[in-house]
Image: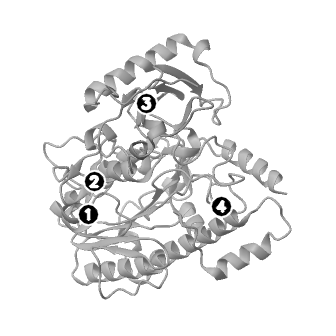
Amino acid sequence: MLKTKILLFGIFLILSSGCISTAQQKANISQKSSVESKPNVLFILADDLGINALNCYGNPVIESPNIDKLYSEGIHFTNGYSNDPTCAPSRASIMSGQYVPRHKVYRVANRYKKQKGTLEHMKYLPPENYKLQGSGAGLAKDKVTLAEAFQKNGYATGAYGKWHLGKNELGIIHQGFDKGFEIIGHYNFKTYPHQDTVDNSQYSADFITEKTKEFISESVRLKKPFFAYVPYYLVHKPLEPKQKYYKEFKEKYKNDTGFGEKELKVLAMIKSLDESVGQLLDYIKKLGIEDNTIVVFASDNGHYKTKNNIFNQPYRGYKGQTYEGGIRVPYIFKWKNHIPANTVSGEPIIHIDIYPTLLGLTKSKFPENYILDGEDLTPVLLDPSRKTKRDALVWEYTNYARYNPRKNTFASQWVNVIQMDGFKLTEVVETNGYYMFNLNDDPYETKEILGKYPNIAGKLMRRLEKWKKETGYEPPKKNPDYTGNTK
């Protein structure tokens, strides 16, 4: 039963990979907004939700009716990417609008430093995360965050949920948000800075939703446009679903051996995420501001590994890897009467595009003397037949972890990846080697083709080197603790 569903799922993705005609839809869209004020922005960011972990993106076992409805009311992207296969670097790219070498949030943690066997077999040391004394690793204060850009354009800014970009001076309230604080976990969640009056026994998604509604309500009352950033902790581990949803899925799939406890819990957590998204969308309608509110839904990176990987399939890989399953994520944009409903784009987009796109859509001023690496997608959103202008997408992933002496391999290591015209080249820093896939006819990365296309490989290598120079890439440094990779 499960294999049949996954097969149908793969067919759906292939059929939906291109753009559909929007001429008739655009003809029915009014050119005027019913509200004259600057548009509000509601940006919902899921945690560890891969592109295949939603019903609307083709996975038949997922229950996500509210996100599915949002999907049908706006435009979705089939080739949307995160800037990193893990949390902190991708979130830093979203908030800064910059590639990893510029913002210097390279990793969630330096796992290799706690793994002697790993450290001793690394030829090179990756660059260090930016740190501020007393605040830890995070996004530097000299970065103009998306929230700060909106503040300078007269917006009220609020954020409740997972921040992951530093504490104290690098925390939410010091990085451009008028209101908000960090929330980590599901049940018995933690708050940073600590909030004495918060009841953390409730489900964190419910709490985040209520605080966001309070912020939106106050902004409307004060007649200020708002930027509400809603980074839910769902569906990040620990696997702590609401029991009512867990029991529903356990009963539903009790006779299906393809589902284990982990899969059932994830299904229940996705349903909770969907429930919270629905509450926010309903609240915007209740306040009468739906026509003047831009809604964005995305995820920070691909889904973590599960036994049958139904949340990543048919793509290869998962969170922590730069295969497609680790970096492809859902993107949905809705703006009633502006963005054509029920449309799709196959253009490749990435997290760094969110910053310039939201400023472009709201006709806000861009920060002066500040580099934004992304592209303003406004033309594509308003007319899905349009194409993006850039020539390449690039990733730097520097996470060394879990050296295996028997296989003489790392579970993860430093790689640089570039995608151009559907060809995806990976540079393995440790071995100075390369491998390449053609996503145009092999989106699931089953056939390595470097030797078949030497000219294309060379073109991508040269473009990657140019990118390194443009972004201030720090080259590898020899590891003084290296003892030699011997089996």
Labelled pair 2, 4 in contact (Cβ < 8 Å)? no
Q: Please provide percent x and percent y for residue 255.
A: 86, 68
Per the model, the C-alpha gap separating discs 2 and 4 is: 34 Å
Per the model, the C-alpha gap separating discs 2 and 3 is: 25 Å
Q: Quadrant of the C terminus?
A: top right
Q: Is residue 284 left or right of residue 441?
A: left
Per the model, the C-alpha gap separating discs 3 and 4 is: 41 Å
Find disc 1 in the rendering and name its residue: 167
Q: Secondary structure at mark 1?
A: loop
Find disc 3 in the rendering and name its residue: 122
Residue at image coords 81%, 51%: 3
> Is disc 1 surrounded by few (<14), some (14 to 19) or many (20+) residues within 10 Å?
many
Find disc 4 in the rendering and name its residue: 55
Residue at image coords 68%, 57%: 59
Please state which of the two labelled residues, at mark 3 or mark 4, is closer to the viewer.
3
Labelled pair 1, 2 in contact (Cβ < 8 Å)? yes
Vertical relation: 31 (above or below) 272: above
Q: Is residue 457 visible?
A: yes
Q: Please provide percent x and percent y for residue 348.
A: 48, 39
Amino acid type of disc 3?
Met
Q: Secondary structure at mark 3?
A: loop
Q: Secondary structure at mark 4?
A: loop
